[in-house]
Image: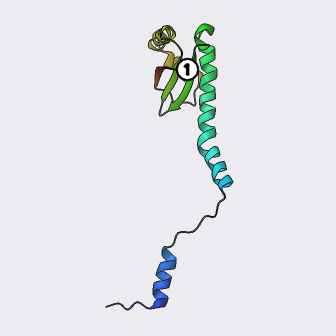
């Protein structure tokens, strides 16, 4: 049977401890912004610019790309009539056109949602 001394137990305990990372809240927020928020915002900005270029002005004033997650672009539309017109454009390969305009952004689907812009 193995005998554990206090010194050996302390060594095992110290070896198994995780290194503490002393970070301030501002450092943590900076990391979150740099790694998560800014890349998403950059991609959504590219999509919004392409959206403005591809659609006629009467539809861009009544719709707005809201979020982009896992290849699904969520677009807010303020009325049922404009939602129907956008649905026709989506069926006519609006996704393909957006992919061409935004090569670094993954867009597989457009979900149209009625809501406030």
Give how far across and how far down residue 99 sits, in percent: 54, 23
Name the quarter where the C terminus is drawn: top right
Q: How is the image coloured?
A: rainbow
The residue that appears at 50% across and 25% down in the rendered structure is: 74
The residue that appears at 61% across and 64% down in the rendered structure is: 21
Q: Secondary structure at mark 1?
A: loop
Circle 1 is placed at which residue position?
116
Closest to the observer: 14 or 61?
A: 61
| 10 w.r.t. 98: above or below | below
Give how far across and how far down residue 110 sits, in percent: 47, 22
- Number of numbered tags placed on the structure image: 1
Label 1 neighbourhood size at 10 Å, few (<14), some (14-19), many (20+)? few
Whether residue 95 sits left or right of residue 53 in the image: it is left
Residue lying furthest left: 1
Give how far across and how far down residue 67 sits, in percent: 54, 29
Name the quarter where the N terminus is drawn: bottom left
| 10 w.r.t. 103: above or below | below
The residue that appears at 62% across and 26% down in the rendered structure is: 46
Please identify the quarter of the rendering in which residue 44 is found: top right
Give how far across and how far down residue 49 sits, in percent: 64, 21
| 67 w.r.t. 17: above or below | above
The residue that appears at 59% across and 36% down in the rendered structure is: 40
Closest to the observer: 24 or 99?
A: 24
| 99 w.r.t. 16: above or below | above
């Amino acid at each position: 049977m193995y005998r554990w001394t206090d010194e050996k137990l302390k060594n095992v305990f110290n070896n198994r401890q995780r290194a503490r990372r002393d970070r301030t809240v501002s450092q943590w927020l900076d990391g979150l912004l740099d790694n998560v928020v800014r890349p998403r915002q950059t991609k959504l900005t590219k999509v919004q610019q392409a959206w403005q270029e591809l659609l006629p002005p009467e539809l861009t004033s009544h719709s707005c790309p809201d979020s982009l997650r896992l290849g699904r672009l969520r677009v807010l539309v303020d009325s049922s009539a404009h939602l129907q017109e956008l649905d026709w454009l989506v069926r006519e390969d609006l996704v393909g056109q957006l992919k061409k305009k935004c090569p670094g952004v993954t867009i597989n689907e457009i979900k149209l949602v009625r809501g406030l812009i």
